[in-house]
Image (cartoon, rainbow, N blue to C red):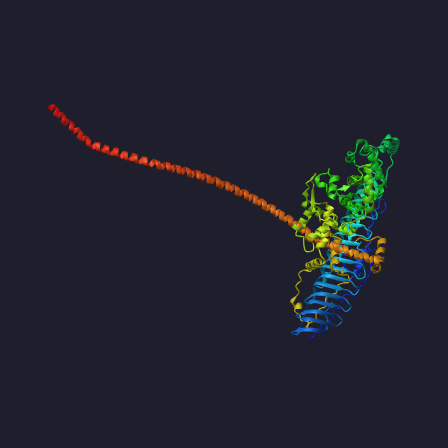
Amino acid sequence: MTKGKKKDAKKDGKKVAVEKSEESLGTTTDSSLTTLTDLWSESLSEEIPAIPEAPDKEVEEPPVQPVPLIHEEPVLAQVIIKSYEGEQVDELYEGEGFICFEGGNTYKGLFSEGCMNGEGTYTWADGVKYEGTFVKNVPMHNGRYTWNDGSVYEGSIQGGLRHGYGVFRSGTHPISYIGYWCNGKRHGKGNIYYDQEQTSWYSGDWVNNVREGWGFRRYRSGNTYFGQWKKNLQHGRGKMTWLTDNQEYEGQWECGVQHGSGMHTCFLKRMEMSQYPLQNKYVGDFVKGERHGRGTFLYADGAMYSGEWVHNKKHGKGIFVFKNGHRLEGEFVNDHLVEYPAHQGSAMKAKNRRATSPRRRFCIKRTTVTNALGKTSVLGSDTYLDLLSLLVLFPEEDREEEMQQVELAVLRHISKLKKAYYFYSTLGYAPSPEGTYTLTMLQFWRFLKDCKFHLSSVTLAEMDRLLRGDKPPKDIHDPSDRLLFRTFVSYLVHLAFHIYHEEYKDEVPHLQKCFLEMMSRNVLPSASCVQGILYSDEEFTSFAMRYCEKCWEIYGDFCRPCPRPPFEPTVKLRQFLWMLDDLKLLSEQLTAPRVLGIFVKVGVSLPGIHGVNLELEMVFLEFFEALLECALVHVTEDMILKEEAQSNQKRSSFESKDFSKETSAVSLTEHSPPQPPRPCEDTKPAHQPFLLVSETLLSFPITPGESKDDVSLPSKDIKEEQDSCPEKELIDEAKGDKDEQRELFSFWMYQVETFFTTKFFPAFEHEIALRDKMKEKNKQDAELAGLRKIQAEELERLTAEKEVEDAIKQEAAALQGSVKPRKRDVSSWEKLVSSREVQLKKEAPKREHSPKKRGSQGSRA
């Protein structure tokens, strides 16, 4: 067997694992490749601190870090073939074979025309392995790189480099990258996770391993930044939220600091369960992270300063307006107004007048709250009960007593009601910087179902009709409508009366008895025990809520007017089932009986002897949860694996470059195959069947135009990330259970996304398109029918006219036929007369001669 010999090409360098300092911010734009050390250092980068309200120095520009030592990927070396085992055709390697090169590198796989062509495995002497497709001795298309430290890359390959969509997971650090690559570098859209729990991550645009463009960065502390990036720093328009400091900045950035026009808000910490936020706000110019230039500062108490700023201090001309409306205008120096005795004196007098003014006593009186009957309420100003529609049902002399007793009953349970209100108002929402939350109807429905109100004879839709019948019909069942705490309590009193009034119809005070019974049976035992799939997990809730708005649109489309006042549109169980059938979503897995079981599971229908009542109405919470349950039934694991394979095939498909004929036509027997290029150690994530796909598609959606690099983490976050060891976490059984639950929810999320994005929403859009086509066709048919009607009418008119004309002609012809015999008689008479005249004319001379004869004879006589 002929062995082609070529010299070994030296590698550009060995793998170097250089840990960058904690102060480093990542790779520079000159780095040709991103190594594992780059990714790890990015996770340790310093997080931008919040803007202080005090005139302290704010955000310093991060120091310039040294460029890390990075080596190029070694070129495919040309080596001497040591041995070959396999098939040959015309002295060319063909079919399956195993080749061993001098130096220890090996290849096992398919050959064609003497070249590595097809599926194969190439292993370097130091343990690095490539498994995938070869095209004329070059790794192409799809492949998997595995390093001896456990790091794995799986995805698209072009020319031996990561190119296209791929996943990398480090074997030594909890770091992974999922996204697009170009010539071995992170380039395009991609997500990078810096810890095992995926609490520190970046999702957005990459350019040559650098965050550049639009992107979202979440730090382990919970702080976030969304906006534009340039060279791994915030640059352009962006919004930074410091949850740990209750601050927020939105505006222009330059080289990682606030620079240009922007708005900085500091949320004052409120007491838990407060509904009204307090905040200090600055709107104006920033220079290198400081308030500098012209700007307006709005204080939480109502005061305001508008004017010039220098290094976070009021300095220059400005106007200060106190909360009482008093104005001071002049020159400010270092946060203080230049002293003017006249101004100081007037300010002191104004202060003294305010201290002795009767208006202050009057303002205190204005805080007194009266109830629906005009009496002083024992409840606070935020708990006004609107019970007038209930009080009119009682005798006038009992109304005041009923109102007082129910207010006392509410006051007895006010703390528990506030805790329940606060608990449910936070479901499905990220932490609010100002700590204020307002209950939505969607959350209120969840509260009612958890407290088993729907097990009474009143459905949630009927409750809405009862409590909100005075609103416009389209708003009665609106899930986004917000309820203040006083409205929440008023609704509960109304529900208590309508559910339990029959039980206590002979007892007084009636409202109090009903309310206390409701609290003991429904609220106290079951409040805050969340049921249902929507709010079963915080991450799952956040993910599922992305589809809420579109589902509300579909809910409204399938609504039909209720036959009872106020005739608002609702969806019945029957219509939900018809909807699934119309959208072709019923299948072998999701059958009609399974859907009926889902109705019982989500609580929209109670199990009965005679089956499910399909005439029951659904509120949007029940509609949405029923869809989520349908997603878990309709989308199976086999379907996920099949669609994942198709998706990966589409992502990895690309056009391979044309190689020179000289290189490609060379036989392995004459020339040794060049070794596949060694990817740098930075290549990324390991492959986990559909879990990786769920992370890619579900965990952190890429918003339009996301971007690049990282900002550094605070020192405490650095310590947390250094101390977090995956091995220790895996030993912990609680951690194992948590991971198992997380995998379950990840699978759920993938099922939900697959159902909504590839089944439900496209089917609805197709249905809408068909409806539009039908409308257009009906319109065309109506126009055509109108045209045909006009043509028929015109034809009928012309036919009638023709008939009339024919009748006239027939009459004329008949008349003409009767006149002709007369003409014949006249003509014969005329001929007779004319012939007689001719005859007379001929006889006339004869007549003239005969008298003469008679005359001569007479004379003779």
Question: How far across and down, in percent of the image, does residue 330 sit?
Answer: 83, 36
When asked about the image quadrant of residue 690, the answer is bottom right
When asked about the image quadrant of residue 165, the answer is bottom right
When asked about the image quadrant of residue 329, the answer is top right
User: Quarter holding the C terminus?
Assistant: top left
Q: Is residue 801 above or below residue 736?
A: above
State the residue in front, 839 or 44: 839
User: Quarter holding the N terminus?
Assistant: bottom right
Name of the residue lying farthest toward the left: 860
Question: How far across and down, in percent of the image, does residue 35 sit?
Answer: 78, 60
Q: Is residue 220 above or below residue 300?
A: below
Q: Is residue 423 above or below residue 840?
A: below
State the residue in front, 435 or 105: 435
Q: Is residue 546 in view?
A: no
Question: How far across and down, in percent of the image, does residue 849 sit?
Answer: 16, 29
Question: How far across and down, in percent of the image, does residue 74 sit?
Answer: 75, 65
Q: Is residue 123 in view?
A: yes
State the residue in front, 190 or 231: 190
Name of the residue lying farthest toward the bottom: 1
Q: How many marks?
A: 0
